Every structure is written in structure tokens, then in C-alpha cells.
Amino acid sequence: MLSEPLERNQTDQPVAQLVLAAQGGSRDAFEQLFERFRRIVHVTAYRRLGNEAEAQELCQDVFVQALRKLDQLQDPACFGGWIRAIASRMAINRAVRARPMASLDAGGVAPRGVETETPLTRMIREERCEQLRRGLGRLSNMDRDTLTAFYFRGRSLIQMSDEFNSPVGTIKRRLHVARKRLARQLETLAAT
């Protein structure tokens, strides 16, 4: 393990000073912050994702997001915790979005020329899709837009926060409420 804190560098310039300079537009200051915190952000991402390439890509995305939101950080001395929180949230969002892409097939890839979907499973899938479309159609615009952004367009909570001009907590609540409303609509449709 390192004997000095991760927030320190050879220059020993306090993190708060670097944050203030970066908030003032100094690219050099932000590069120093990147160098100091890159490792901890990468480790956070890797622990959540378990994939080196994904962790490296997410690390870059975290710092891009941090640069965009740096003016919102009110206490410059809290940069370390703030960047870790961004990394953790973005890693969770990425892991959740990536799950449906994982194969359930033990071999990983279905053999070519073998149809894995039967007419019955295709019909059931299409019927479920139609019910989902009808259920979404019965929701308010806000509920529908929230669910569509997260599940169909793959937006992260942070991206949705920017898009809907609302805090992340509000977006989480909207998702929760919209899912419950959609579930009630689907139950109603199934009963008819």
C-alpha cells in the first residue's frame, strides 16, 4: 500500500487549491486532480464492473462528468469523496445497464443455424412487448419519458438529471414511482 494519501502528489499543493483553480478554468489544475484521483476512481470502477476495459472507459467518463459538474462542488476540500461518489454511481448505472446484454447460454454463443426462439416463445415475447407498449401509453408523459430514458435509451441517472433538469434524487424517485405505476397498468391489462 502507499504510505501517503491518494489525494497527495509530489507537488503537495492542497486539493482545495487545485479545485478552486480548476473551477476558475485552469486546465493544469484539473489535470493534477486527474493524476491524483485517477487510481482511486479506476479501482472503484473496477470493483463494481469487474472488467478492466470497462473500468478504464468509466474512469474517463467520471472525469468528464466531474469537469462538467465541478462548479457545483461547494466545498473544494471534499473533492475526493465527491469524485468517488460520482465513480460509484456511474459504475452502478453502467453495471445495471449492461446486465441484459449478458448471455444466459452456458456456451456464451448460440450455434449458427440453430433457431433459439420457437414460434410460441416469439408469440409470447411479442405479446409482452405489446402489453408493455400499451402500459407505457397509459402513463403520464413524465412517467413514460422517465422510464423510456432509463430503460430504452440507456441514460444514466446523471444524464437524466441533466436532461430533465432535476436532481438525481428526484430522478430516482420518478423512476421508482413510474415503475410502480407501470406495474399497476400491466396488471390491469393482464386482467382484461
Image (cartoon, rainbow, N blue to C red):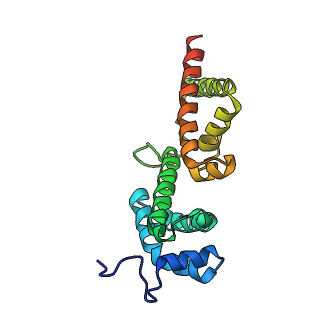
Q: Which quadrant would residue 175 be assigned to in this image?
A: top right
Q: Using the image as rendered, state which of residue 64 and residue 106 is in the foreground.
A: 64
Image quadrant holding the C terminus, namely top right
Q: Using the image as rendered, state which of residue 62 and residue 135 is in the foreground.
A: 62
Residue at the spot x=56%, y=24% of the render?
124
Let me know if residue 75 appears in the view.
Answer: yes
Residue 132 appears left or right of 78: right
Q: Using the image as rendered, state which of residue 108 and residue 149 is in the foreground.
A: 149
Residue at the spot x=31%, y=80% of the render?
2
Q: Is residue 58 above or below residue 135?
A: below
Image quadrant holding the N terminus, namely bottom left
Residue at the spot x=61%, y=68% of the render?
67
Residue 130 appears left or right of 103: right
Let me know if residue 115 appears in the view.
Answer: no
**Residue lying at the far bottom of the rendered structure:** 11
Q: Position of residue 95 (x, y in %)?
A: 48, 51
Q: Is residue 2 above or below residue 51?
A: below
Q: Position of residue 45 (x, y in %)?
A: 45, 62
Residue at the spot x=41%, y=63% of the render?
44
Q: Is residue 51 above or below residue 1?
A: above
Q: Position of residue 4 (x, y in %)?
A: 33, 81
Q: Which quadrant would residue 8 be assigned to in this image?
A: bottom left
Q: How many marks?
A: 0
Residue 84 appears left or right of 31: left
Q: Position of residue 184 (x, y in %)?
A: 55, 21
**Residue lying at the far top of the rendered structure:** 192
Q: Is residue 73 above or below residue 148?
A: below
